[in-house]
Image (spheres, helix red, strand yellow):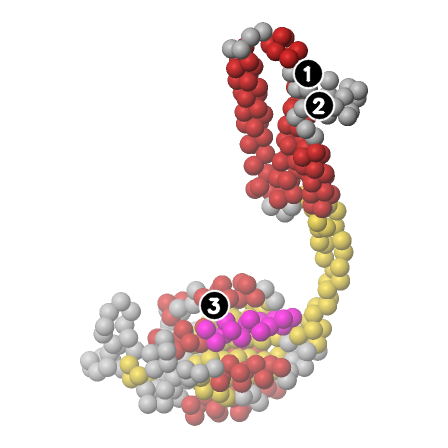
Amino acid sequence: MFRFAHPDFLYLLLLLPALVLFYIFTIIRKKRALRKYGNPALLHELMPEVSDKRQHFKFWLLFASIALSIIVIAGPQFGSKMETVKRQGVEIMVCLDVSNSMLAEDITPNRLEKAKQMLSRLTDGFTNDKVGLIVFAGDAFVQLPITSDYVSAKMFLSSINPSMVSTQGTAIGAAINLAVRSFTPNENSDKAIILITDGENHEGDAIQAAKAAASKDIHVNIVGIGDLKGSPIPLDGSNNFMKDREGNVVITKLNETMCQEIAEAGNGTYVRADNTNAALRALQREIEQMNKAELDSKVYSEYDERFQTFAWIALILLLIDFMTLDRKNRIFSKIKLFS
């Protein structure tokens, strides 16, 4: 099977007819210029070393080398090769709190953006691991099913905002239960849940959900994000802060006690995120200690690059063009290839 890796570059081949027309135009213009000086047949006798066929030959050499160069750029690929890929890694489901309290700016730039930055850097450290993403507030939703496509994971991560979940709250228990159901049936590799939240206004039995996850050998790690002293919640597009029904500014605080209790029930680790990278390093150490098993073993086809042949031919044609003179060589004058 044959294909091009970058077929859009083949549109450059449309320039080749224009190159031929330009060459014909220059030949006609050259002949007209010669007629000004006299009869072309007589002038040809005065220039015995000039060979029109050499000039044509050099042009078509250049033409062919340009065409082949365009093909090289387009990336010709021939056939296919089969490879067996084995992945040794772990499975991780990330549960990210997107409630309005995550907009508090007690951590720079705010709690939610800090969490996204941390997860993005954590994903950069993955190799053969699988990762999934759940967002939750009053409800929990799977944003990205568990996958080894880290590019998609980071793309979905960058688009997360509180408006994704209309129901406000902090349904930690629902997020843990959904994460448990989202893992693959693979029983060999370790599985872990990384839950990032400020723990405020939690709903449901989060501790019971963490114990249920631990009973299935799924560790529940909690990243508490926020300040214990609390911070107001800015309203988007204004300098005002969120207020309660009585008109008082809402102050959101990190519920560290609740986060620690959930992590303990889930046989996991609790770490508080701040403006340093301490939480990220703690999560990386936790993941490194997990048991990595064969997640999948699959055979796939991959095209072989075949641009080298075209590149060599183009190079040889250019060398021949360079070595071919416009005029006849007196040493080889008896050879009539270009007479």
Write down the residue under mark 3. 157
Marks 2 and 3 in Cβ contact (< 8 Å): no
Write down the residue under mark 1. 48
* Residue occupying the point 64% across, 40% down: 69
Vertical order, 339 against 91 (above or below)? above
| First to last magenta residue range | 117-131
Q: Residue 163: where, in percent of width, then height?
A: 37, 67
Q: Which of marks 2 and 3 is in front?
A: 2
Q: Does 68 appear in magenta?
A: no
Q: Which class describes the residues within 10 Å of circle 2: few (<14), some (14-19), or many (20+)?
A: some
Q: Which of marks 1 and 3 is in front?
A: 1
Q: What distance separates the C-alpha of mark 2 from that of mark 1?
A: 8 Å
Q: Residue 137: where, in percent of width, then height?
A: 41, 75
Marks 2 and 1 in Cβ contact (< 8 Å): yes
Occupied quadrant, residue 328: top right
Mark 2 or mark 3, earlier in chain: 3
Write down the residue under mark 2. 328
Vertical order, 21 against 302 (above or below)? above
Q: Which residue lies furthest to the left in this view?
A: 247
Is residue 1 shown to the viewer in this render? no
Occupied quadrant, residue 26: top right
Q: Residue 166: where, in percent of width, then height?
A: 37, 69
Hey, what amino acid is under mark 3?
Answer: Leu
Vertical order, 109 against 7 (above or below)? below
Q: In this view, does 289 lie to the left or right of 30?
A: right
Position of the C terminus, as image quadrant, is top right
* Residue occupying the point 24% across, 81% down: 249
Hey, what amino acid is under mark 2?
Answer: Lys
Hey, what amino acid is under mark 1?
Answer: Pro
Q: What distance separates the C-alpha of mark 1 from that of mark 3?
A: 75 Å
